[in-house]
Image (spheres, rainbow, N blue to C red):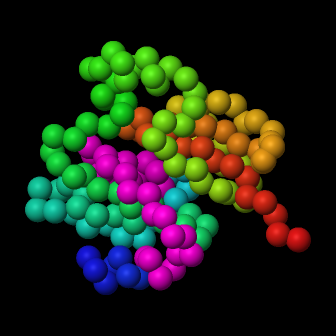
């Protein structure tokens, strides 16, 4: 995994790398590629078929994924069992989520909506830029914001 990590890391200019856990890592990885348009860089499964390590890229950034334990449950499942988590998740805001800058946020919004993402807020104008919020298949929250165009 060290070589794969180094290859992914060398292609990124970011200094902070989000690391997200998923109960069904392979399914979440496929969903994130299909719905949010990430590109799969690395997928490593353990002997039980769980996601041991994955790297997704978008623009010049990466996100890492894994299934850390067979006992892990994502935010969506956790809300079903935990009343305080359900209540704090009633707001459309990003709670322990990830901000992703994209070139065309309107097209990204259309794709995510068409492909079944749970949309938390409609496409909104800035400032600082147009954006929307969505949840993924396991309830992780994402904000997608239009990247400032270079002059």
Q: Is residue 123 visible?
A: yes
Residue at the spot 45% in from the left edge and 63% down from the top edge: 17
Up the image or down, 85 lies above or below 37; here it is: above
Q: Which residues are magenta?
A: 8-33
Residue at the spot 37% in from the left edge and 51% down from the top edge: 20
Residue at the spot 71% in from the left edge and 43% down from the top edge: 131
Residue situated in front as seen by the camera: 85 or 8: 85
On screen, residue 87 versus residue 38, left or right, reads left
Q: Give residue 40's quadrant in the image.
A: bottom left
Count the marks: 0
Q: Where residue 136 sits in the image (x, y, percent)?
A: 46, 40
Up the image or down, 2 lies above or below 25; here it is: below
Q: Where residue 58 sits in the image (x, y, percent)?
A: 56, 64
Q: Where residue 50 sits in the image (x, y, percent)?
A: 20, 54
Q: Where residue 38 sits in the image (x, y, percent)?
A: 52, 59
Q: Give residue 55's quadrant in the image.
A: bottom left
Residue situated in front as seen by the camera: 106 or 75: 75
Q: Give residue 121's quadrant in the image.
A: top right
Q: Quadrant of the C terminus?
A: bottom right
Q: Is residue 106 visible?
A: no
On screen, residue 133 versus residue 77, left or right, reads right
Magenta stretch containing residue 25, yes or no? yes
> In the displayed image of the protein, which residue is found farthest to the right?
151
Residue at the spot 22% in from the left edge and 41% down from the top edge: 72
> In the displayed image of the protein, which residue is found farthest to the left?
47
Magenta stretch containing residue 9, yes or no? yes
Q: Quadrant of the N terminus?
A: bottom left
């Amino acid at each position: 995994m060290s070589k794969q990590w180094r290859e992914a890391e060398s292609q990124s200019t970011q200094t902070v790398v989000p690391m997200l856990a998923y109960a069904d890592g392979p399914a979440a990885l496929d969903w994130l590629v299909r719905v949010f348009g990430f590109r799969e860089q690395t997928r490593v499964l353990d002997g039980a078929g769980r996601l041991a390590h994955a790297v997704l890229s978008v623009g010049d950034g990466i996100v890492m994924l894994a299934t850390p334990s067979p006992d892990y449950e994502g935010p969506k499942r956790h809300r079903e069992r935990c009343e305080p988590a359900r209540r704090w998740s009633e707001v459309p805001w990003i709670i322990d989520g990830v901000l992703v800058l994209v070139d065309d946020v309107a097209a990204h919004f259309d794709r995510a909506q068409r492909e079944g993402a749970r949309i938390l807020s409609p496409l909104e104008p800035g400032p600082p830029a147009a954006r929307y919020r969505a949840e993924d298949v396991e309830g992780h929250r994402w904000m997608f914001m239009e990247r400032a165009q270079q002059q």
